[in-house]
Amino acid sequence: MKSLLFLMVCIVPSMSAAETAGTVVTPGRMLVNNMEVQGNATLMQGAVLKTAATAARVELAGGTIVSLDARSEAVVKGASVELRRGRGMVSSGSGGIEALGLRVDGAAPQSQVLVALAGDRIEVAAVRGMGRVRNSQGITLAMVHGGKPLSFEPGPGTDESLVSGKLRRLGAKYVLTDELTGVDIELRGRGLSGLEGARVEASGRAQKAGGSPEQVVLVSRLNRLENPEPQDDARGASSGTATSAAAKSGAAKTGMSAGTKIGLAALAFGGMAAAIAVPLAMSN
């Protein structure tokens, strides 16, 4: 009997350690699984986090760091968090932020990517580097560049894409870089031959690509666009001028990627990154 009790005591801590997902730190107070926490706490998988008047920083296994803005809610899921309310920023690691069935992470080293949940859509902005947005099938929907925040509204039961850009040959493939999302897309279908170098608009069913390009579109409709290829002035613009810069460039302001509606984000992220970073720096 004593041996059995000793075995049980040894096993329980081991199981708890295996479920540990990371830690959270806040300069104020917050709720973890509806229990008030002040300062820091150890997190288990599935932990529900609710910030109050101050931000919080979540450090997960694999080095992922997700900062939650004040009055936000998220759930720990593996090396990522699922955002249920408010705003967050992912800044490193192999994980990211999930929301509405989409996953947002950094597409370049040391990237910082902001995510805001706004009703039935999310809005994404890159503070540093570049962000990547994928759906639950792993299809890359967009590459988000600094100064060009985008909004994403998942659609029910559709996998259609609507893309536009300058068509080029890449070996045996016909490829374009979508002007709105920045995603390299392979087009498959009739009527592509002879359009190399032309600006085209194509729509059709989207599929996950095996590597680069990041998405395949089985073209059902193809149009040649007569106006010249727009200059992507918005990539270097500040977040406050992204919409006007894109408008001047002539680039598409809305599109569709694997069933998700995409447009230029109207939300002003403003000083969100600073609002998250400053109190956390003070807490350290």
Image (tube, grey):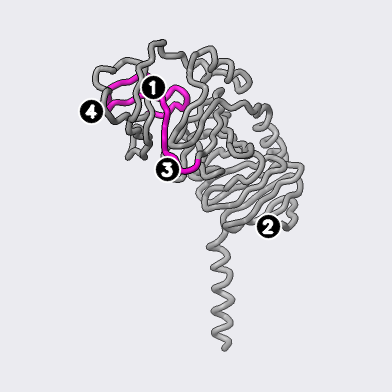
Q: Which residue is mark 3?
A: 138
Distance CA(mark 3)–CA(mark 2):
30 Å
> Residue 112 at what x, y percent from top left?
56, 34
- Quick one: label 4 or label 3, which is nearer the N terminus? 3
Q: Earlier in the sequence, mark 1 or mark 3?
A: 3
**Circle 2 residues within 10 Å: few <14, some 14–19, many ≥20:** some
Say if 130 sits above or below 6 in the image. above
- Please report whichever mark, 3 or 2, sits nearer to the chain's N-terminal start: 2
* Residue at the image point whose x is 35% and y is 26% from the top: 221
Q: Is residue 194 visible?
A: yes
Instruction: For the N terminus, give its image quadrant.
Output: bottom right
Circles 3, 2 touching at the beta carbon (< 8 Å): no
Mark identifier at residue 90: none
- 101 to 241, vertically: above or below: below
Residue 149 in the image, given as x and y percentages of width and height: 56, 27
Dot in front, 2 or 4: 4
Residue at 70% x, 41% y is 55
Q: Determine which of the numbered discs, if any, sits on residue 172 in the image.
A: 4
Precedes in sequence: disc 2 or disc 4: 2
Residue at 63 percent across and 21 percent down: it is 240
Q: Amino acid at mark 1?
A: Glu
Asked if labels 3 and 1 touch by Cβ distance under 8 angstroms, the answer is no
Q: Which mark is residue 201?
A: 1
